[in-house]
Image: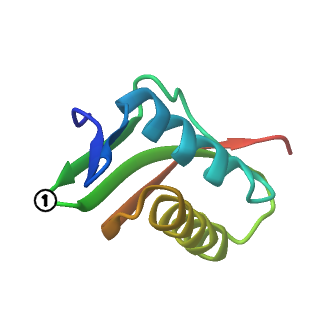
């Protein structure tokens, strides 16, 4: 996990903590129907280097969804959320599907 993200402006700075970054990623992920972050405290990593973010997370998904489509949707939602809310450029969102829920 990174140390967070700092936006410096002439009037001061804005710090987005690692916990807030993780929550943005978790909520963006879970806005996709059928997806949730598996063990967010241990299975979600946001690294920021020079204004560029790289996200790694493990998903638990509902049985029956098309996995590649859901994973792409999650990647796009995370990219949009971090870019819009934090002004970050997204280098990569690496998704691993670790668990299927329901039957």
Q: Residue 27, image x and y in percent? A: 65, 44
Quadrant of image for the C terminus: top right
Q: Is residue 74 left or right of residue 101?
A: left
Q: Within the image, what quadrant is residue 72 found in?
A: bottom right
Pick the front one: 102 or 93: 93
Q: Give the vertical position of 19 relative to 68 (above or below).
A: above
Quick one: 18 or 56, which is closer to the camera? 18
Name which quarter of the figure residue 4 lies in.
Answer: top left
Q: Position of residue 93 (x, y in %)?
A: 38, 63
- The x, y position of residue 82, in whole percent, is 47, 59
At horizontal 65% and vertical 76% (from top left) the residue drawn is 69
Mark 1 highlights which residue?
Answer: 50
Q: Residue 99 in the image: x percent, y percent?
A: 60, 41
In the image, farthest residue toward the top? 41
Q: Quadrant of residue 90?
A: bottom left
Locate residue 32 relative to residue 18 in the image: left or right: right
Q: Residue at x 53, y 57 (%)?
A: 85
Against 76, residue 96 (above or below) is above
Residue 7 visible within the image: yes
């Amino acid at each position: 996990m990174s140390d967070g993200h700092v936006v410096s402006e002439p009037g001061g700075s804005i710090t987005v903590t690692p916990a807030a970054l993780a929550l943005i990623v978790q909520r963006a992920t879970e806005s996709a129907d059928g997806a949730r972050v598996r063990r967010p405290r241990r299975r979600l990593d946001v690294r920021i280097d020079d204004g560029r973010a790289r996200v790694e997370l493990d998903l638990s998904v509902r049985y029956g969804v098309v996995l590649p489509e859901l994973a792409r949707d999650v990647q796009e939602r995370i990219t949009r959320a971090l870019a819009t809310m934090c002004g970050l450029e997204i280098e990569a969102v690496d998704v691993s599907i670790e668990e299927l829920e329901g039957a």
